[in-house]
Image: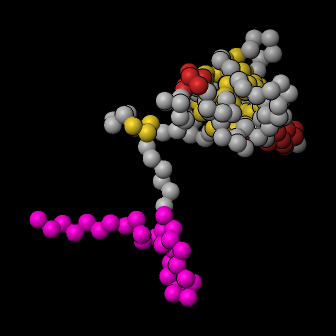
Amino acid sequence: MAAKMVITRLILCALSLSMIDFSMCYLLKSSVTCLDCPTGSDLAGIKILVKCNQVKNLAMATTNEHGVFETQLPSSNCQAKILGGPKQLYVPRNSMVTSIKMVQETGSYTTSQPLTFYTSCPLSQNNDGKCGAHNNVIGRNIGSSKTVDLPLPKEWGLAPSSYYVPFVPIIGIP
């Protein structure tokens, strides 16, 4: 009878230990800063991507109206990056990706450098006063990719002209 009680207690102990999750969980608490926004601007909806070494899954965080975000990290060796927001953001290259470090007082993690962005193209990053793609091989700005759409009567039953007007066939005549 005593043997059955011992076996029962061992089984119950093993079951209770199997339900405990021993994984470590790290908490990232940080914020983003807008360099050209007026004081008190709404910074909600900015997406922050967090990539940790030797982990396939990415962590994603979204800022609140003050620009503060929190997310769970799968490991302690991670990097954070501003992914985007409800409006187009301009992120300086020197603050595009930042590593994550531990805060000794709270035991949580934060970014080693502030995540900063602009809402308009900063003058220091302009190419001849223009924001946008720049072709370094030729040294000229890349042109617009807009297509020409000629008005065609609907009675003709043709597809929009932008599907076939810019097409220039390559015939290959020597």
Return the x and y of residue 64 as percentages of the image width and height.
82, 35
In front of the other: 102 or 75:
102
Return the x and y of residue 168 as percentages of the image width and height.
32, 66
Q: Which residue is painted at 68% across and 20% down in the image?
A: 114
The answer to whether residue 77 shows anywhere in this view is: no
Quadrant (top left, top right, bottom left, bottom right) of the C terminus: bottom left
Q: Which residue is painted at 55% across and 82% down in the image?
A: 153
Return the x and y of residue 4 as percentages of the image width and height.
84, 43
Return the x and y of residue 152 as percentages of the image width and height.
52, 78
Q: Which residue is painted at 85% across and 38% down in the image?
A: 9
Q: State the extent of the magenta-drawn residues as a range.
A: 148-174
State the predominant SS element of the stretch in magenta: loop
In front of the other: 16 or 57:
57
Quadrant (top left, top right, bottom left, bottom right) of the N terminus: top right
Q: Which residue is painted at 48% across and 72% down in the image?
A: 161
* Drawn side of residue 62 relative to residue 57, left or right: right
Q: Is residue 26 magenta?
A: no
The answer to whether residue 174 shows anywhere in this view is: yes
Which residue is outermost to the bottom?
Answer: 155
Residue 95 sits in quarter? top right
| 4 w.r.t. 43: above or below | below
Q: Is residue 173 magenta?
A: yes
